[in-house]
Amino acid sequence: MMSISHAKGSGTSGLAWRIFRRDWRSGEVKILFFALMIAVTAMVAIGVITDRIHRAMGEQSSEFLGADYTFSSPRPIEQSWVEQGRSNGIEITETLGFSTVLSKGDKFQLVNVRAISGKFPLKGELEIADKPFTSGMKIQGSPELGSVWVEPRVLSLLGAKVGDKVDFGISQLTIAGVIVSGPGQASEVFNVAPRVTLNKQDVEAANIIQPGSRVSYGLFIAGELEAREQYIAWLKERKNTTQRITGGKEGTPALQASIERAETFLRLASLVSVVLAGVAIAVAAGRFSRRHYDYAAIYRCLGMQIAQVHRLYFTQLSIIGLIGSALGVALGLAIQQIIIMQFADYLPKPMVPIDWVPVLVGALSGLVVLIGFALPAFFQIARVSPLRVLRKELVPQPLSSWLIYIFAIVAMALLMWWQSGDFKLVGILLGVALLAYGLIRLIAWLIFKLGVWLGKRASTPIRYGLGQLKRYPAFTISQITAFGLAFIIMLSTVLIRSELLDEWQNQLPEGAPNHFLVNVQPQEVELLENILAEQSVQTAGIYPMVRGRVVGVNDQTLQEALDERALTDGAVRRELNLTWMTDVPKANQVTQGEWWVGDALSQDETKTNQLSIDEKLAERLGLKIGDKLLFSIGGIEVAGEISNFRSIQWDSFQPNFFIIFQPGALDAQSATYITSFHLQQAQKPTLNTILQQMPTVTIIELDAIMAQVQTILEQVTRAIEFIMLFVLLAGIAVLYAVLQSNRDERVLSATLLKTLGAQTKFIRTSLVAELALLGLFSGILGAIGGEVLVSALYKNALKIEPVLHPWVWIIVPLIGVVFISLVGWWGLRGLLKQPAHQVLRQM
Amino acid sequence: MMLTTKNLTKTVNSQEHDLTILSQVSLTINEQDTVAIVGASGSGKSTLLSLLAGLDVPTSGQVMLAGKPLHELNEDQRALVRAQYVGFVFQSFHLLPGLSALENVMLPIELKEQKNPEQQARQLLEQVGLLERLHHYPNQLSGGEQQRVAIARAFASEPKILFADEPTGNLDTANGEKIIDLIFELNQQLGTTLVLVTHDDRLASRCQRVVRLEAGELVDDTAQEKAVQEPHLESAAGHS
Ligand SMILES: Nc1ncnc2c1ncn2[C@@H]1O[C@H](COP(=O)(O)OP(=O)(O)O)[C@@H](O)[C@H]1O
Ligand SMILES: [Mg+2]
């Protein structure tokens, strides 16, 4: 028998501590304590993991960009800005970009020059090979003076090989290597002129930049998080509207949507753990306070002041809060470390360190959940009348239920906002919570109806089980609410996860195009088709492409027709890739207006050509269906009338076009063709064949970058799977907590039945019937609520088209029945074997 | 005068009409009196006790306990009076399951901020014959033992007045006898005023005065010539 030190136990806090120790051992506080611990563990683990993965992914996408940020400007950048950064420990590489002509002998080729001084790229690596379409060396640095790195097609266009000299302005450069992969490739797919990289000092020597040349001045920027964010903020204050800052994530348009969805999901998962924790704590606190009314009445009877009783219980709540949070933090950190180590292979090394902010947020969140969900119940305890020692039925005046809800909702909203920083998401979830409340009411009503209806024909134990549910409707409803919520949350997590994974799989299926061919001449199309067919390479279609500029809207010039903002839009300032098609292309959807039928040529001469435009572009330019656009294509003007808007999935790795004409509207002779296809490593020599036979074709290799995209998606998938598992465990813990907290009531009624002479078999059947019915009802609630929640989230947060999941309607109630009756029965089984008086004494 | 009431009435709202469960009870209890409140079940005994002890307030009428007008005091003020002057023994013991026997007995002493709570509590537990059970928790004690702890706790704060509501109601005869003996023994020793509710005639017969309630009204208030000073029954040693 443990002995307790009484010496200093005179204050209420000493008493509180003593009572806590005893209560803990008798298991009464355990559920409350574990609920809190689960909450904090989940919040810390998920918080830290998402934060670390988020930052790790940021690092990785910086590799696509080549830096944490890039800065670009049409005029020279103030040298003092660069100094400002460098003096704060920021790495900065200065670049120049312009178009010029490289020549060798009688061959000339327009190229995009990137001239660098210093380390490049700052994040990630350049892969340089000495032959086209082979793998090369990974380096960080700039080309040596007098040398140039070129894209593979430059070699075939100029008839050169690595080591040859080419003319560059008034000087000569040696081709030192072929760029296999490097930053920025993904966003350069449609650059017609190939990219060459050379040393900045050679630019001056070549005397190639004349007044009036179009040059873009750039900075590649990298550094420690805090310092670089400060510097970027500093730059943002000073930059003018022609200067642009691009951040890590924006460097990879193809990945952006996926990463954002993954982040949204992870944020949701941590919100979910908050909701679950809240439910568990509210349930456990309710039970705790019910069990303590008696004791509080005795304290009051013995002369304790109300404030003293409050202090006693608040002290206990604080002890639970502090110890529970501390253990939760420790466990959460351990778990996240295990997870991170589990897939260290997929994460960049060294892994980003733990940031203590999410840890602190997790611990504090635990306390907020505890206070928000437990305080109202704890507050009740001291309000019990001392008369309860004589009249057991006296319970405290219930607090205004609004007060309790407001307390919980405020705590919840605070936490959600804290965890997600996303007001919209918090709004949706709280909205759905209120909606769920309405549904719960409805189902409670259904329970009565069903109970009465079934009660007429069911066997006695089932009737008894139903009777139990009918006898305490409030109790029944609160249980269904809690179980249902856990089911809703678990179901939504599972559904959203599989939907996300499917989406990604669709987006980057096996054999997704990883090479683009641009600049195919009309007379070469047949030849290309033959070569590809010979190697059994399948294309996503060969599309014509015409470069044209928008010059007028509705018979007005751009200046007259568009407002100031629209006039600065890139789409009206440069040439666009135009095409024509018979059918709506894959990965596109008509959102407004009608797609055309047939060719323009086959129709009435007087009718204008139809065209289809990207809905986002139309919105930016303020265009409507029926507006007429005038294009200048190679000096010839072509008009078209907008007949429909399209939404375009830009990250689909298919050729995408802002503007598509009706077939026949554009002159087929001035077009070049574009296609994309999937090549495996072994098929890469095909590219050589293509270049030999049609040297002007531009080949864009995306296989390296797509492999990287695949890797990132794999990482995210794993993180999501694991975190989902975690949410499921938390949900199960909540189910268990609720079952545990209602165990007393069940044991009592079963024991009473027993003293009345019921057979154990009867008691068992009726208990299981009661539990199974609870499971059924909450499973139905879970299915309805889950579908509603998921649809709302798809629409609003994840931007996926909502769908229904019929299988859920059967599976979830089934799981509810099986799980709740099994676990519930398992918790009671032992007690029913004991004699009734022994059970009653333990209560 | 320890306790006086004047026209004590308690009315409760039940199903849309008012129900008077105690009507115009006036009585006076002197210091060191031993008073039994008897009556049929439902006659209002517990209600009266709860008003006398300040656990509840009357609908009308007055209660003065140790010179304090309970009917005018709020919850906390009445709690203070209870802490200062009142001890309780209940039918269902009402020990705190989270505390050991010793801690249960120490609690009122601590609340009154008296010295040496542990020593006093030990002494009392020794007196009720539970010295070996100091560190046992209520669920490890039999009903009789629990009630003895409750008695030790009731006397621990050295109350001026002890209220007991059917203290033997949940016990078998032998244990009941033992409890009665202990109550009277400690009562005499400490000079406590005793008010107990019972329908146990033997218990009532040991009080100086018997007050009878019928349907919430005081119908009889008899001073017994001489309270039966029964010799102690043979010690129920087997139970401790
Ligand atoms: N709050 C209440 N509401 C309704 N009826 C009550 C309330 N308190 C007591 N009663 C009723 O008053 C009567 C007296 O109760 P009580 O004092 O407990 O009687 P006794 O202790 O003599 O058995 C009983 O019929 C009881 O049901
Ligand atoms: Mg009574």
Image: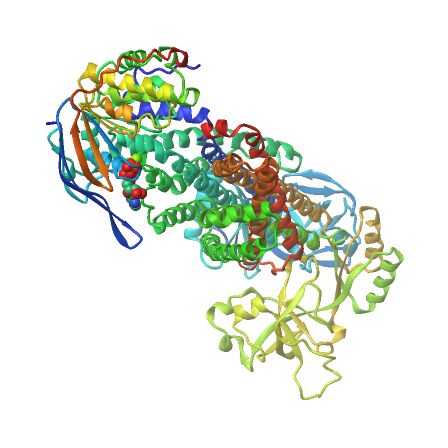
Residue B197 in view, yes or no: yes
Q: Position of residue A585 (x, y in %)?
A: 71, 67
Q: Quadrant of the C terminus of chain A?
A: top left
Q: Position of residue B185 (x, y in %)?
A: 24, 15
Q: Residue at x 74, y 83 (%)?
A: A601
| Residue in front for this viewpoint, A77 or A360 | A360
| Residue in front for this viewpoint, A826 or A321 | A826
**Placement of A769 over or under A810, stated as above or below:** above
Left or right: A785 in relation to B106: right
Q: Residue at x 41, y 23 (%)?
A: A22
Residue A96 in view, yes or no: no
| Residue in front for this viewpoint, B22 or A662 | B22
Q: Quadrant of residue B148?
A: top left
**Placement of A694 over or under A562, stated as above or below:** above
Q: Quadrant of residue A361?
A: top left
Q: Position of residue A502 (x, y in %)?
A: 68, 52
* Count of numbered labels shown in the rendering: 0
Q: Quadrant of the N terminus of chain A?
A: top left
Q: Residue furthest front?
A: B225
| Residue in front for this viewpoint, A315 or A194 | A315
Left or right: A553 in relation to B165: right
**What coloring was used for the rendering?**
rainbow
Q: Quadrant of ligand 2?
A: top left
Q: Position of residue B214 (x, y in %)?
A: 24, 39
